[in-house]
Image: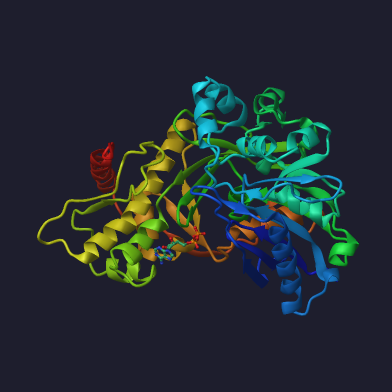
Amino acid sequence: MKKYIMALDQGTTSSRCILFEKDGRIVSMVQREFAQIFPREGWVEHDPMTIWSTQISVATEALLKIGASWSEIYGIGITNQRETTIVWDKATGEPVYNAIVWQCRRTADYCEALSQNGVRDMIKEKTGLLIDPYFSATKVAWILDNVEGARERAERGELAFGTVDSWLIWKLTGGRVHATDYSNASRTMLYNIRELKWDDELLSLFGIPSSMLPEVRPSSSIFGYTDRDILGAELPIGGVAGDQQAALFGQCCFNAGELKNTYGTGAFLLMHTGEQPYMTENGLITTIAWGIGDKVYYALEGSVFACGAAIQWLRDGLKLIESAQDSEYYAKKVPDSGGVIVVPAFAGLGAPWWDPYARGMIIGLTRATGKYHIIRATLESMAYQTSDVIDLMEKSTDIKINGLKVDGGASANGLLMQFQADILGVDIERPVCVETTALGAAYLCGLALGVYESLDDIKKNRSTDVVFHPEKSQDWRESKVKEWRRAVSRSLGWKE
Ligand code: ADP
């Protein structure tokens, strides 16, 4: 009797497995952290075999933990850290180098040179991305240029490239399937998101043979079956999506204009824009949300560098709080921030400011300012930054948002969520299940396998924990945002 959908959530610091019931409830969850490898300043790698072994062990443990067997699993959904790049030998399944992680800056100079070569607009137009070491293309090129013999082997058709989803699919199917989904392909900087194909001009720009590339498939479709020798069962892999896109799906943002924000160390905002890829010139990324059947849906993505990180700074730097949760307790001791604004531009500011020289600032201090005001202002900065990105999304499309769905560690903070509702003037909805990334992978899989009949069927699962309604006037909102922007303008260009 089939009962559960298995989600493999392969993240940057840990591999996790969650078993979901059809109604979206979690019945088992196991997580294993693994080593981060820092060979040099700014370089970040993972061992692909460790990614694989931790992922398989948590999958097995998640079953054992509840005494379930493989025969009770409908199928597997995969969601993954995006952009991280693995190259392996097609014959042996051996990686030729460690996984180069999305955070790795080793190709910064290469990207800088590309930007100056005048290919920026062409890349943006085709891929929706900004030239940055995050994306896979320059990482693949680095491996081919720096691992002895790699280029020759690649040219002979012996090597495969994949993001982490492809790597897991390959391993799970015993090397029978080399595939990825639209959402992951759209993060490689090699995929033409309009024409839906690997782009020859980009492949030749980066010197990457097309024989290395995975086949791109709809996010909700059967990618293949697990090899019985590996899992002891032949199970369909029915859903695949990059982590942020999976979270958008898990939040049931199925229609244009629906968006979610994940309040973690940084914040990740994704807005579903329907079947239209909106191209913007202001630092937002255009990406594929997912493909279902013969349709592909797009999203706009923006991020805030320092979100929960600002709370970590209150705790570890200023030592004003002992735990992140304390921030709410202290902030509630004052009715407002007393005119204080904190701009957490610790490492510059992203969209819409794009200033690497901006630095953090506390402004508006008076003799009446106390620690509670500073804590409150720091929480408020998370909401202001979110609101700046959303404002940009609205301006870049003809879409007006009418609500925001939230998840991530800091979404637990009620004061922050209420302030966010007040600043945006829309409802903020926090779901009961904040494991939206894994849930999205499970839903994509369940949809492909017919566990769910339709998106509406999935939506019925959604249960809301709290809705925060805006309680302030338009005038209040405008004057607060104006004050915030005045503060930000003073933090720009500080570092010379
Ligand atoms: P990540 O996946 O980036 O590690 P998480 O989603 O686990 O992030 O969220 C952790 C972040 O959220 C930390 O930066 C932490 O400071 C912040 N955070 C956690 N709980 C709260 C809270 N109650 N109020 C404000 N910030 C919080």
Question: Can residue 448 be seen in the rendering of this structure?
Answer: no
Coordinates of residue 106 in the picture (x, y in percent): 54, 41
Of residues 97 and 352, the one nearer the viewer is 97
Question: Can residue 117 be seen in the rendering of this structure?
Answer: yes
Residue found at the very far left of the displayed protein: 367
Of residues 298 and 472, the one nearer the viewer is 298
* Colour scheme: rainbow
> In which quarter of the view is residue 233 placed?
bottom right
- Looking at the image, which residue is at 33% across and 52% down? 381
Coordinates of residue 371 in the picture (x, y in percent): 22, 65
Q: As displayed, is residue 117 above or below residue 259?
A: above
Coordinates of residue 79 in the picture (x, y in percent): 67, 54
Ligand 1 resides in the quarter of the picture at bottom left
Coordinates of residue 202 in the picture (x, y in percent): 66, 26
Q: Quadrant of the C terminus?
A: top left
Q: Is residue 155 left or right of residue 414?
A: right
- Looking at the image, which residue is at 47% across and 57% down? 264
User: Total marks drawn?
Assistant: 0
Q: Is residue 207 left or right of residue 326?
A: right
Residue found at the very far front of the displayed protein: 148
Q: Quadrant of the N terminus?
A: bottom right
- Looking at the image, which residue is at 40% across and 41% down? 350
Q: As displayed, is residue 389 above or below residue 98?
A: above
